[in-house]
Each structure stands twice: as structure tokens, then as C-alpha cells.
Image: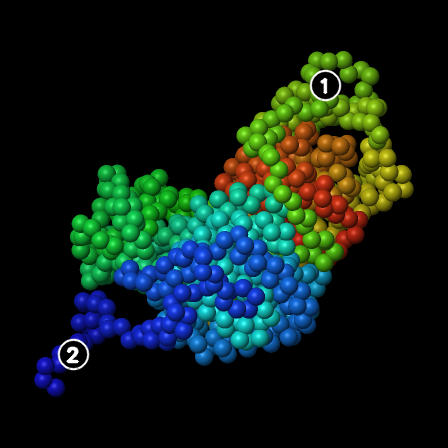
Amino acid sequence: MAGITSKTIHDIFQSMEYGPSSSSTATAQAWLESHSRALGLFIDGKFVRSADRQTCNVTDSSGGPVCSTVCAVDEDASLSVSSGASGFKAWSALPCHLRAKTLLRLVSSLQRHGQCLSELCDLAQSPSSPSALVRLLQYYSGWAQLRDSLIPDWTPRGVVVVVVSDDCSLYSLMLKVLPALAMGNAVVAIPGVGTAPPVLLLAQLFVEAGLPAGVLNVVTGSVLSLGSKVAQNPHVSYVTYSGNKKDGEILCRATAGMGVPVSLSLSLGATCPFIIFESADIDSAVDGVIETAFKKNRECQWMLCVQESVWDSVVARLKVRMAGMKSVPLLAEGDRRLVDAAVQEAQQQGATLIQPCPPSSSGAAYPPTVLCGVAPSCTCVVTPSPGPLLPLLSFRSHGEGVTLGNHSPHGQAASIWTEDLTLALEAAKSLSVGAVWVNSHSVMDPSLPISGHKESGNCIDGGKEGLFQFLRPSSSPPLPRSSPASVDYSKFGTAASAAIIPEGSNSSSTPRSYLQYVGGKQCKSESGSSVCVLAPGGGTVLAHCPDGGRKDVRNAVEAAIKVQPGWMKKSPVARAQSLFSLAETLELKRRDMAVSLHSQTGLSLEKADMEVELSIAQLCDWAARCDKEKGGVPVRIYVFLAVCVQHLLTHPQRSGVVGVVLPDSSPLLSMVSLLAAAVAMGNAVIMVPSPKYPLPALEFIQVLQSSDLPGGVVSIITGGRDQLTQALANHSVIKAIWYWGSMEGCQFLQHTCASPLKSLWLHCQEKDGGRDWAQPHASLQEEMWRQAVQWKSVWIPTA
């Protein structure tokens, strides 16, 4: 027809113009109008809106109004948790198949209302695919059905609070909400501004599908203040957060001392490496980086690492592919200033730019920009700014490429491109990230775990592994709640240990002076001082033990760093042999250990001998686990070949060091149980014995020395619990702390270990009554094992 011009496929690829939008927002607009564009809170199965509440406006990409949401206050927070507590009783009492049936009904409802949800997400600038949410629902409906048969001896926590930052996606929020519901918990969701409208719609659909009132409540407003307010409620059992690191740290510190576990998924703002090796398909790799690096809504920032031999080829293709690209809208008005500053700094450090067009002098859009030749220390690499910026770095060898990929303090994900399968697997194993995509990117499936490494989080989402954060062992009582104590974090652990024996004093009247164990050798503490070890009932001095401190912890970490990579690389069979060797040596010294337990704790010789017997059994049990399913590498095949790798607490090139502050109860058995769990999975441990009963641990040093366990894998440092806890918390190499101690110690660790981030397993001896170490419940063993590992998903596309 005259007047109509048609474009060929070649023309479209040459111009790279956006096609006409076929989307309509009529369905979403109608739903918003039915609520007068003023969305209330969703509490106890219905929308609640008080006239005296302040509101927050939700805007679209052009800044136009979409709707308003309520800013919840303390009264609303309390009401939502009370409703959740009531809903939990009804929901958790249902049989598994009825909970699954309810979630499956929501699948049908979501499929019917998928258009409305998709339009609402687009309007609120929080794009999410309804089909991806349907897949999530289907997956977790299955786990709701199978919980009791496949995860026996575990029970739901209770009321779970899910907090996401303003810039987090709906998918990230539902990746926490749905497994929590599937396991039988009630949920209080605190979404960000853009995520609030679609979450409120989903809450309405949940209730229409038959979810009991109160099981899912949604409160909106300031996510940080609301998160801490809701966490104060004694009915809350668990808090989990997804979003940026800054807000995560604030929430973690605000909830310190409340007695509620807090987990963080810090994907937003993380720098993820996109590595192109010389053996890659360059065209496919460049297409992949263009596709993922310049999306408007993305939950991580990418840095492009290119091998020098193909640098020119990659840069040339980038220029061609970017030539027709348009400017990308920024998410916030203040982002333009941050983007301009990042580009200016990179240019001052010698970077050159690839841009399809010059940026406008002002405005809320910026052209896709590649910063060629930036240094790894540049701000745009370490702490990337928002906006369509892609740092481009070079490397020479394969090993240098992996090192460059591990340079970032974040460990969320990586994409590697090579046609060499051996290189791909070696690089994937060596990268300290939670997910690795080979010749692909951003592939997600709820059946595989997503585990943040380093500063990208301390919890696992997705897969069976992600379910356990919403469960507790049935044999373990719920964690007791508390109010924050008055703790001076700057002075915690600085007081001198009680009953110190100064160096050079006359100790002829003491039965024995013990040495601590660092780097495979017995030694005095760096302070040169010792503390008295008293007999049961006090008064009589049994022995002196070293008064360890910060320098002793430093020495133990240095020894662990040297030996742990080699220990981790040992085969599971070799690690099992070392643990069996420990068990055999402990059997030979059984009588001496029983006498030490008897004299230190006052146990009868018969009970002391039984504790030694149980300790031997624990070593044998963990040795047997080393080369079984949970110590090996299970492989699961999907559309992609998905290799699920049980990864250690840290990546192999640096350390896998766990600090363990031991309990007072069952001093030998608890130490051996925790030591065996950590060491069996390839970690190194620094153990702090109970100040009340340190002698069994010090006697155990002889067992360690007589075994074939490499020196440095286990260190034992005695002294004040608070002093050594403070030293462990402030050492950047230690990535996990297992703690049994005071309420103040738990609060200090929650506050201090928010940055740099550490995984915490905390137990307040004053309130939880202590674990029964003599009862080897399967769920308690499972809990110890899960504390000793992290997970990595490696995606390899296959034909």
C-alpha cells in the first residue's frame, strides 16, 4: 500500500530501534481504580487503611503518579505480627497436602491474573515475569506436599518477616515468601515502594485461593524502620532481608540483641565478573554482555574481563553492537550525579569510553557506556554506581582472569565464556561466587540454590537447601527472645581475664601449666600470661592455661590460611582417613581424657568415660559422612546441565576459617562434634574452649598431635570468652563464627559482623538451656553440616 514503508530484518539490526510497544495497562489501571488508587495495608486477610496515616506515592518511569501506599506505624506493625501468630497456628496445623493444595490453587489464579500482575509490575517499575512466579509456585507447592516425608524432624519457625529494599524485584521477594509459606510459616512481608502494588495484589489472590487469614500480611512504608519495629515483636521468629548491602547492615545492627536470627541476601549493587577467555565464541559473548549489562532493572552490576589476545576483537564488536542503542532511563533523579562522577573519575584514571551517543547535559537517562581500561581498584569496579556503566578490564593468563574475577568483595554470580570445557569447570570451581553461568548469563530456576559468598550475603535461597532457613530441628526448642542489652561495642572484650597468673610468677604449687595449640604446635600465649583453672565448686586450682588474645588469633588464622587450601583439595576419602585417625588416637587416650573430664567437671568416671565414647563415635560418624552424598558432589540435570557444588565457607584460594566459641556443657563431646563437622567439609577451625572447663580441650591437643591431621587445620586458644570473641569478630579472614556464650556476646556479634559480613550461628547459654550433645538427632547433625558448607550452582548449556 502507498505510504507504508516496511523494514527488513537487516534494517532493524542496523538501526537497533525499539519496536512499538504492544503492552496495555488497562487491566492494572482497572484494579488500581477499584482501590481508588490508594492501596492500604493487607492484614488478617483484608485491606486496612486508616485515615490518619501518611502515604507514599508510587510513580511510573516518566514520573507520573500510579497510586499511593500507606506508611505503616508501630500499631500496624504490631497488628500484622499478631495476625501472623494467629494465622501460623491454623496454617501449620494443616496437613502437608492441604497446604500444597492451597498453593496450587494460587497457580491457577496467578495464570488468570497474570496480565494484571505484569502490567502492575511495569507501572511500578518493578518488572517481573508472571511465568517465573508460576514456576516458583509450582516448585514450592511440591515441597509443601513433601515436607514431612523428605525433611523429617524439622518444624516451621513461626512468624517470618521478609524485608526487601526499594530497588529489589518482586521475584526476589517471592523467592523468600513462597518457601516460608510452603514450610508452614506465617509471613509478614515488607516490600519496597515499587514492589508494594504487585505484592498487595498477590496477597489478595492468596486469600481468594484459600490461604487462611493472617498467614500472609503485607505492611508498607520505610522498610528499615518497619523491619526493626516488626522484629521487636516477641512473636517474630526469623527475619530475612534481600536488597542492597547498606540497608542490610543497618537492619542487622538495628535488630542486634533482640534474639531473632537475621539473614541477608545482598545481591543489589554487587559487582559480578563477565569473563571472556580467548577460546570463547566472541560474537555470542558480546551479545550476552550487551543483553545483561545495560538492562534498566538489574539486580547486580557487571564488570567485563577480557583476555588480552581477544581485546581488540571484543572492543570492535562492542562498538558495532552499541552503535544503535538508545539512552537508558535511570531509576532515581539523584542517580545522574553519581553516574557523571563515576565516568569522570574513570576518565581521569585513563579510561576511554564507548558510547552510542554523547550524554545529554542533564536528565534522567544516560547512554550505555563501556569504560575501557579501568584499573581493578577504580571506584566504578569496587563500588559501582547505578546506571548503564560497564567497566572493561584486561587479563593475560587464565589464572589471572580468575583472580580478577575474585577481586570484587562481592560473590553473587559470574558469567564465563569459553569453548574449552576443562577451562570452564576449573574457572567455575575457583571463582568465589554463588552461581556460575558458562556461556550464558542470568539463568534462574527455583530448584537450584543461590548462595551469596563474601559480602553478597549469608543465607541460601532456592532449592531444597534454601528451605532450611525457614525450619528448625524439631528436637531443638524455639530460640528465646530478649531485649537489647546496653553494650559498649567499642569496649566489649577489652577487660582483663579473671584470675590471671602473670608471667614469671611462682607456679610451683599448681599441678600443671598447659600450652595452647596453634599451627600444629603447642605454645604459650603471646601475652605470656595464664589464667587459673578451678576445680568444681571453686577454691582449688587445678591448673593454669594460657590467656590468649588478638595476637594468638592472628597467628592461628595465618597458620590456617597456609594449610586450609590444601586440606580442602584433599579427597573426601583422605579427609575421612584423618578423622578416623583422630578417633583411633582418642581411643588410645580414652582413660586420660575421662580422668580429665572427671577432675574438671565433677562427672563420675563412668559418665566421663561415656562422654569420651560418644566423642569417638562422633568422629567416626563425620568421617563416614565425608565421602557420602553430603560430603561429595551431587549432580542434578535439568534443561541446562546444572552441577550443584557444595562449596566451603570461603573459596579455596584464600581460606575456609571458622571460629568456634565452645559451650560449657559436655566440654569434650561438644568440641569434638563441632570440630568434626567443620573439618570433614574441608574447613579449618579456631576453637575457643569454655573458660569454665578448658582442660578437656587442652588434653585433646595430644590427640591432635598424634593424628595425621595437618597442623593448622585445628587451633585451640584458651582465655577469656569475650576477649577471644572480639578478636574473632574483628578478623576479616574469618568468615563464620559458631558461638555459645552470653546474651551480650550474641548481640556484639550481630552488630559487629554485619560488616565485613560473617555467617553466624549463635546460642545464648543463659536462655536456651543448652543442647543435649549426647542425643545425636539426625536434624541436629544436619544443622551442623549445613552450617559448615556453602553452595554453588554451575550452569552449563547443553544441546
Position of 655 relative to 267 (above/below): above
Residue 524: image tag? none
Residue type of the residue flagged with mark 1 = Ile
Q: Find residue 715 and report its horizontal and vertical position in percent.
A: 65, 35
Q: What number is the disc on residue 501? A: 1
- State left or right for residue 361 relative to residue 122: left
Q: Tell me the quarter of the picture where residue 716 sits.
A: top right
Relative to 130, is 720 above or below? above
Q: Position of residue 497 (x, y in %)?
A: 68, 25
Q: Residue furthest left?
A: 2
Question: Residue drawn 78% across and 42% down?
Answer: 666
Amino acid residing under circle 2: Ser
On screen, residue 101 versus residue 445, left or right, reads right
Which residue in the structure is indicated by mark 2?
6
Where the N terminus falls, by quadrant? bottom left
Q: Quadrant of the C terminus?
A: bottom left
Sort mark 1 into few (<14), some (14-19) or many (20+) by Cα contacts within 10 Å: some
**Extreme bottom residue here?**
1
Secondary structure under badge 2?
loop
- As displayed, is residue 445 above or below residue 711? below
